Amino acid sequence: MNAVTTPATARELTTYVLRLADTSLVLAQRLSAWIGHGPAIEEDLGCANISLDLLGQARLLYAYAGELEGAGRTEDDFAYLREECDFLNATMAELPNGDFGQTIVRQCLLDLWRLELFEQLTQSTDTRLAQIAAKAVKEIRYHGRYSSGWLVRLGDGTDESHQRVATALVTLWPYVVEWFAEDALEQALAERGVVPSVAAVQAGFEARLAPILLAATLTRPSNVDYRWFGKRAQHSEHLSHLLAELQSLHRAHPGAQW
Amino acid sequence: MRPSAPRVQSLKVYGAIAMTLPHDWALYEVFVRAKRGLDHKHVGSLHAADAAMAIEHARDLYTRRQEGVSLWVVKSADIVASAPEDAAAFFDPAEDKIYRHPTFYDIPKDVETL
């Protein structure tokens, strides 16, 4: 069954789907920068595989957003022809790669959050969203295995690797706050069973994270005040640079096709 | 107590970027089963810190195009191989023993994979 019964619902769901899609696309772009630069060629491939999965998720979600919106916008229109102030990705996804340890911490936090979120989205009253989530969950389960495996190795590794991921965790933790600060749009969709409640996702995320941090000998930082809400298009200074590179080819050659 | 930071050795250079590999990563051989009922075939090798990482690397490197349904990894150092200089003594004596080939009876035509 399709959950969209009124134009207002369609608008809310379009925005929500774009949040998911933008997070996937922006993170895919960030990860792809490791290709040719990984600590080993095996990790190059690992990051590239995850990046391609995320790109595939973004495409499915953009296509659905375009249908919901009903204005004829395509995947390319959403990815290449919107400005920074139009992007609704979670801010964490746009943050720089840093060293491999920082990339792993960012990836692990995002994987565990998205795994819980997409698992719960498979129960959505919106059939299409549930189907997209079901496909993505299989991919994200592997991503989480990869990133949490590395987080444990680095956290429980040498003094230097421990210090690097511990520092990255403290640096990145403030950006987790956004995911669990429920806004009116998420609340409205959750009340109709289209999306899970933010509280339920947070509980699942914390339960997944705790044993990994324990194994990695890392401490969960405490929550702090937070100023960026990428999901409401309030971004860090890093997104515009990322988009400039992501969109350069399409802007130089509009409508270019492979 | 954590061990001290691993030394790294230069593996290869892409442009100006030196790719490095922890010196204690071992070489593993990778075997992929293409589908149920077939045997695992050797497809290549990779580096990893341990067997668990080797399996994940094998998944990332060798099953990107739906090549398999099952993976084996084996430490290359654990494989005992015959020496090239023994080849004559090992294999040549079988050359003239044609009676070891089952050529003296007909194989039923429905048997495809014998």
Image (cartoon, coloured by chain):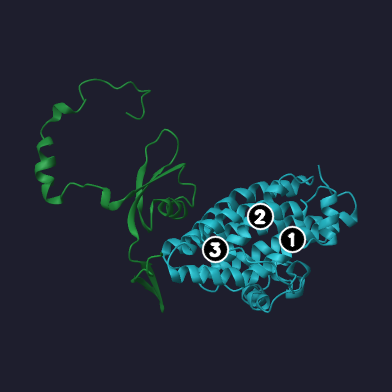
Chain colours: A cyan, B green
The answer to whether the residue labelled 3 contacts the one labelled 2, judged by CB atoms less than 8 Å apart, is no
- Identify which residue is drawn at 13% across, 35% down: B94
The amino acid type of the residue labelled 2 equals: Phe
The Cα–Cα distance between marks 3 and 2, rounded to whole angstroms, is 16 Å
Judging depth in this view, the residue of B22 and A74 nearest the camera is: B22
Residue A258 shows in this picture: no
Instruction: Say which element carries label 1.
Output: helix
Q: The residue marked by circle 2 belongs to what chain?
A: A
State left or right for residue A140 relative to residue B77: right
Q: Amino acid at mark 1?
A: Phe
List the residue tagged with mark 3: A218
Report which residue position mark 1 lands on.
A180
Residue B13: percent from the left, percent from the top? 37, 74
- Front in this rendered view, residue A166 or B96: A166
Name the residue type under label 3: Leu
The image's mark for residue A205 is 2
In the image, are marks 1 and 3 on the same chain? yes
Q: Disc 3 or 2, which lies upstream in sequence?
A: 2
Q: Quadrant of residue B70?
A: top left
Mark 2, residues whose alpha carbon is within 10 Å: few (<14), some, or many (≥20)?
many
Cβ atoms under marks 1 and 2 closer than 8 Å: yes
- Mark 3 vs mark 2, foreground winner is 3
User: Distance from label 1 to label 2 (Cα)?
Assistant: 10 Å
Where residue A105 appears, as percent x and y from the top left, is 56, 65
Between the residue at mark 1 and the residue at mark 3, the CA separation in whole angstroms equals 22 Å
In this view, which residue lies farthest toward the front?
Answer: B1
Q: What crowding class fits label 1: few (fewer than 14 Cα within 10 Å), some (14-19), or many (20 or more)?
A: some
